Amino acid sequence: MSLADEVRKNPLQYLPEKSLLDFWIFQSGYSLRYGMECHLRDDGFGGHLREFEFWLRDKYDIKRDSWGPDRIIDSFSSSNVEAFENFFALREEFLQAMEADSKNGPREVHYEHHDLIYILKSARERPAMYFGNTHFRNFYLMMLGDERAFTDLGLVQGDDRKIWVEFKSWVEKNENKARLGRPWHKIISYWGGSGERALELFYKWLDEFAATIGQPELFQVPQTFWQRYRKS
């Protein structure tokens, strides 16, 4: 059973809510980790994800633009839940149409192996390249996908993962500032306000945490997204 089928069966086991846009970003994080560990996996479309986008555009008579299948389907749905259901119905319709061509087999993309620190630094420079925009929620969903893939692959936790776990605990211990506990991402979302501000706060706290473990430059990059944005 593919990841898509598993999520369709039990969406809340994987996602914060039943939402196509959430699933799309979660899956991107999952697939990215698989690729960076040099493991191949089915994309849920028998290797024909790109063809699905073209098929979908033909179906809705939409010309080529910057939006992917998730945004197209969402725009024709009345709610997050309906978009989620519509996606899987369309996926089934597409796969049936492609069944005759299945002998060609899936086509996979290969990536170089990179650890989690590399991902965090790269997303700091170009967040939209990794999760579509500059919102912390999308970052969190991407990380959920990455963590699920790491578990499914049975990988051994290295120093990068240990630091990530320590950071989340550090946020929950030092930045909650409330009598009752909250998970790290809820704390960042609460104090960060809007999606972009919360992502910026995340990296600010990540630097503060890095300093506490004696590695203040661990997550630094030549120029962050916000530095480029404020110069323009």
Image (cartoon, helix red, strand yellow):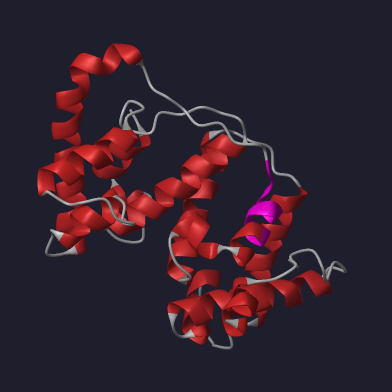
Q: Is residue 180 visible?
A: no
Judged by its main secondary structure, the magenta piece is: helix
Q: Is residue 30 above or below residue 80?
A: above
Q: Is residue 103 above or below residue 9?
A: above
Tell me the quarter of the image containing the C terminus: bottom right
Horizontal side of residue 127 vs 85, given as left or right: right
Please name the residue shown 20% across and 23% down the image. Answer: 98
Residue 77 at what x, y percent from top left?
A: 13, 59
Please name the residue shown 67% across and 60% down the image. Answer: 121
Q: Is residue 83 visible?
A: yes
Q: Is residue 154 above or below residue 14?
A: above
Residue 145 at what x, y percent from top left?
A: 47, 49
Tell me the quarter of the image containing the N terminus: top left
Q: In the depicted view, which residue is nearer to us: 85 or 52?
A: 52
Horizontal side of residue 225 vs 23, given as left or right: right
Please name the residue shown 42% across and 51% down the image. Answer: 26
Asked which quadrant contains residue 137, the reply is: bottom left
Residue 229 at what x, y percent from top left?
A: 57, 79
In the rendered image, the residue lying farthest to the right is 214
Q: Is residue 183 above or below residue 28?
A: below
Q: Which residues are magenta?
A: 114-121
Q: In the depicted view, which residue is nearer to us: 57 or 114?
A: 57
Residue 223 at what x, y percent from top left?
A: 70, 71
Q: In the depicted view, which residue is nearer to us: 217 or 164?
A: 217
